[in-house]
Image (cartoon, rainbow, N blue to C red):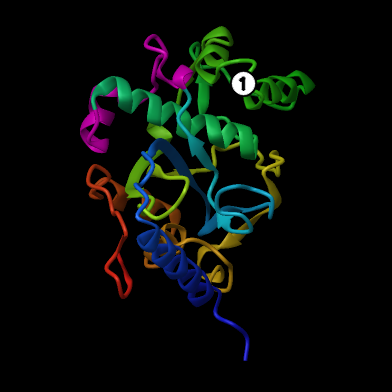
Amino acid sequence: MEADPGAAVEARLLEAARRFAASGAQPVPARAAATVVLLRPPMDVFLLRRTSTMAFAAGMHVFPGGSVDRRDAAADLPFAGPGPDEWGRRLGLPAEAARAVVCAAAREVFEEVGVLLAAPVDGGPLDLRAPDWEERRQRVERRETGFAELLQREGLLLRTDLMRPWGRWITPEFEPRRYDTWFFVAELPAGQVSRHATGEADEARWLPVAGTAGLTMLPPTRRTLDELALFPDVAAVLAAAGHRDAAHPVQPRFTGEAIEY
């Protein structure tokens, strides 16, 4: 019988929780982070498989995402859609912190997928096919250029109207690397093409949301996909996201017998 990847992941987490409890160590602080569930019609999701050498979630299938960078909080970056105050209400954050989280979400999609959730200020088309756009993406990925700085220099607005909050998860206290992660959903912008654009993953592909059951992933990813599988299409997901709670986090806890969510 084929092993259940979800059960195997849960068993590893439970063992890690027991070791941490026995050690008497204190949990490390959770870093602010963002991840984006990138969708395309009819109901496909873009997933990356992290390389086996990564310090966090090695070998796991994940959504594009990562930690907030200090430069993501650029105060003069214009939004095309809900602004920082509105995002602060949705995410349970002060406006400045919400700006950074939303910008980080868009930056990670650009770095890891090559998709840019932005639009020209003048309303013209956005064409990413020119070779110099790949050079710009690499400079952002290497932290040589700030993402907000790039958008401002190119006369682009951050398309916050394409993004919706979906949830928030905090890594359990027994993990050596911890993140306070806001989950967003977004539809692949018209005219843009996704690709495998990061060295942090050894595989990247689109899959039907309903066809991800046999993949190895951490509980937040699995539970998010299970929630999305209840919807018939991307439009329904985006509509439902307006009623989701992304301010109050889910924080798994070890009870001594199990991990509760």
Q: Amino acid at mark 1?
A: Arg
- In the depicted structure, whether residue 59 falls above or below residue 83: below
Please, is residue 14 above or below residue 38 in the view? below
Determine the secondary structure under disc 1. Answer: loop
Residue 100, relative to residue 236: is it above or below?
above
| Residue at the limit of the structure toward the bottom, as seen here | 1
Picture coordinates of residue 1, whole percent (x, y): 62, 91
Q: Quadrant of residue 73 in the image? A: top left
Check disc 1: other Cα within 10 Å, few if <14, some if 14-19, many if 20+. few
The region drawn magenta spans 70-93
Q: Which residue appears at 39% of the width and 30% of the height? A: 101
Q: Nearer the viewer, residue 86 or 145?
A: 145
Residue 144: image quadrant is: top right
Q: Is residue 181 left or right of residue 112?
A: left
Q: Residue furthest right?
A: 131
Q: Residue at x 48, y 13 (%)?
A: 121
Percent position of residue 41, x then y: 53, 54
x and y percentages locating residue 176 in the rendered image: 47, 48
The percent position of residue 74, horizontal first and vertical second, equals 42, 13
- Whether residue 217 is in magenta: the answer is no
The quarter of the rendered structure image containing the C terminus is bottom left
Residue 212 sits above or below residue 124 on the image: below
Which residue is denoted by mark 1 in the rendering?
Answer: 143
Q: Is residue 74 magenta?
A: yes
Query: Where, by quadrant of the figure, is residue 147 drawn?
Result: top right
